[in-house]
Image (cartoon, helix red, strand yellow):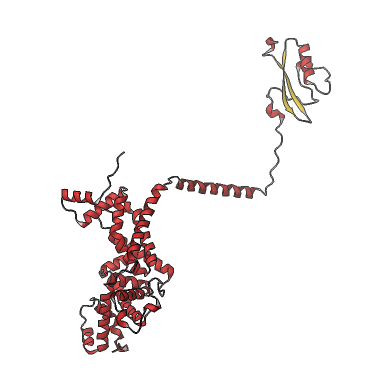
């Protein structure tokens, strides 16, 4: 019975060296094709490639690491489920990110957690020193404060702000991922910036 | 200096400008030159924009990533080990059985109110050959050998067969038990000419 050889980084390198150099998309397409034929190692490689950015996006959208992990798992399992329908010539990354945004948005709607502060992100009261604002402005604390404030934004504004300002995506790309128009996303991001500043000033 | 209420019309533009979106709006530029509050707000928003772009991963992110990887790979490889291709068929069969049971129950329920006549015993004529009439107790069979004779009661098929044999030597008779119950016993007695030579 014919069995597919398991693809490895070494085999990819040999393929690349034997012919023309593989571009990033070519390499991704190769992994996707292998994964579509049932090669779990190839799928695992794709998971390794996307899981970090997806988990990061999920965390920024949800504000809770455990929930981000669940959402990310849901997206990657769907990635495996619909792998056969993917076009290997196209980068699956936009589709995955769009799926992640949708999953997080649905999860956010279900929880109606607009005004909820995730416990794991909220520092202990003893850790905060309101008399020392310089300490609050250290990079890690500032990041945590920003993420806490982000988690309190309305879902749409939070998604637009995360994609535009945190992820650094263009307005067109953010609009495509959110299934919205560019002007709407720009407007939501602007409102999100103002509201975020207000929330940061109010404190936790 | 605080942002003045009169400057609220510039808020969204300031937010856009802080992210480099609103490139140059002459009116806004002019307002910023005059309004210290809006300038301060723009600076704060621009600072916030920069900080958002440098948000660090939370503590425990790497552990969560490793756990996620393990969970995903375990879930996508699990169906291969627990493959049950017959499961969808089983579900469909169960659904079909359910529909059939439900249908039959409905049918039975709808017909329960109508009185069903009890099955009558089949008439003897239905099991008898069409050429001869049935023999019932106390009824005289139409046998040529017995015509003109007074029938004995009650009817004894063995005696009738004997009489046939006596009056028609060489003629075999066939006695068939048609029905037997505590109340009635029905025999069929007939001359069997086809087998007469064997007797």
Q: Position of residue A86 (x, y in %)?
A: 30, 54
Residue sitting nearer the eye, A11 or A102? A11
The residue sitting at 16% across, 53% down in the picture is A21
Q: Is residue A65 left or right of residue B32?
A: right
| Quarter residue A50 falls in | bottom left
Q: Which quadrant, please, contains the C terminus of chain A?
A: bottom left
Residue sitting nearer the eye, A88 or B75? B75
| Quarter residue B132 falls in | top right
Residue sitting nearer the eye, A5 or B144? A5
Q: Position of residue A196 (x, y in %)?
A: 33, 78
For residue A20, say whether it is visible: yes
Q: Position of residue A199 (x, y in %)?
A: 35, 79
Q: Which quadrant, please, contains the N terminus of chain A?
A: top left
Q: Is residue A45 above or below residue A65?
A: above
For residue A187, say whether it is visible: no
Q: Position of residue A39 (x, y in %)?
A: 31, 48
Q: Is residue B123 above or below residue A12?
A: above
The residue sitting at 29% across, 40% down in the picture is A2
Q: State how many labels appear.
A: 0
The residue sitting at 32% across, 66% down in the picture is A57
The residue sitting at 40% across, 47% down in the picture is B81
| Quarter residue B126 falls in | top right
Q: Is residue B102 left or right of residue A196?
A: right
Q: Is residue B59 above or below residue B181?
A: below
């Amino acid at each position: 019975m014919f069995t597919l050889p398991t693809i490895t980084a070494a085999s990819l390198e040999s393929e690349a060296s034997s012919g023309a150099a593989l571009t990033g998309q070519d390499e991704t397409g190769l992994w996707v094709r292998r994964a579509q034929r049932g090669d779990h190692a190839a799928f695992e490689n794709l998971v390794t490639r996307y899981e970090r950015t997806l988990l990061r996006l999920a965390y920024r959208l949800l504000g809770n690491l455990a929930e981000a992990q669940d959402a990310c798992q849901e997206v990657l399992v769907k990635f495996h489920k619909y792998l056969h329908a993917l076009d290997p010539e196209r980068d699956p990354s936009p589709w995955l990110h769009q799926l992640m945004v949708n999953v997080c948005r649905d999860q956010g709607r279900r929880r109606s957690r607009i005004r909820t502060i995730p416990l794991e992100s909220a520092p202990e009261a003893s850790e905060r020193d309101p008399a020392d604002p310089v300490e609050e402005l250290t990079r890690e604390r500032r990041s945590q404060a920003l993420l806490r404030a982000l988690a309190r934004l309305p879902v749409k504004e939070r998604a637009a702000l995360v994609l535009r300002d945190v992820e650094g995506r263009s307005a067109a790309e953010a609009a495509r991922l959110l299934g919205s128009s560019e002007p709407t996303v720009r407007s939501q991001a602007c409102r999100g910036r103002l509201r975020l500043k207000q929330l940061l000033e109010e404190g936790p | 200096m605080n942002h003045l209420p009169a400057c609220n019309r510039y808020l969204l533009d300031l937010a856009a400008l802080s992210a480099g979106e609103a490139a140059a709006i002459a009116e806004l530029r002019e307002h910023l030159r005059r309004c210290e509050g809006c300038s301060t707000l723009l600076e704060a928003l621009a600072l916030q924009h920069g900080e958002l772009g440098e948000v660090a991963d939370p503590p425990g992110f790497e552990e969560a990533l490793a756990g996620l990887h393990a969970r995903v790979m375990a879930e996508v490889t699990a169906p291969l080990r627990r493959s049950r291709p017959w499961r969808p068929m089983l579900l469909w069969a169960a659904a079909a059985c359910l529909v059939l049971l439900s249908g039959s129950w409905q049918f039975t329920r709808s017909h329960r109110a109508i009185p069903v006549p009890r099955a009558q015993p089949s008439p003897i004529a239905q099991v008898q050959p069409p050429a001869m009439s049935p023999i019932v107790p106390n009824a005289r069979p139409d046998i040529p050998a017995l015509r003109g004779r007074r029938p004995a009661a009650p009817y004894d098929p063995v005696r009738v067969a004997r009489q046939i044999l006596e009056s028609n030597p060489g003629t075999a008779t066939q006695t068939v038990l048609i029905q037997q119950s505590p109340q009635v016993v029905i025999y069929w007695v007939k001359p069997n000419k086809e087998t007469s030579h064997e007797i």
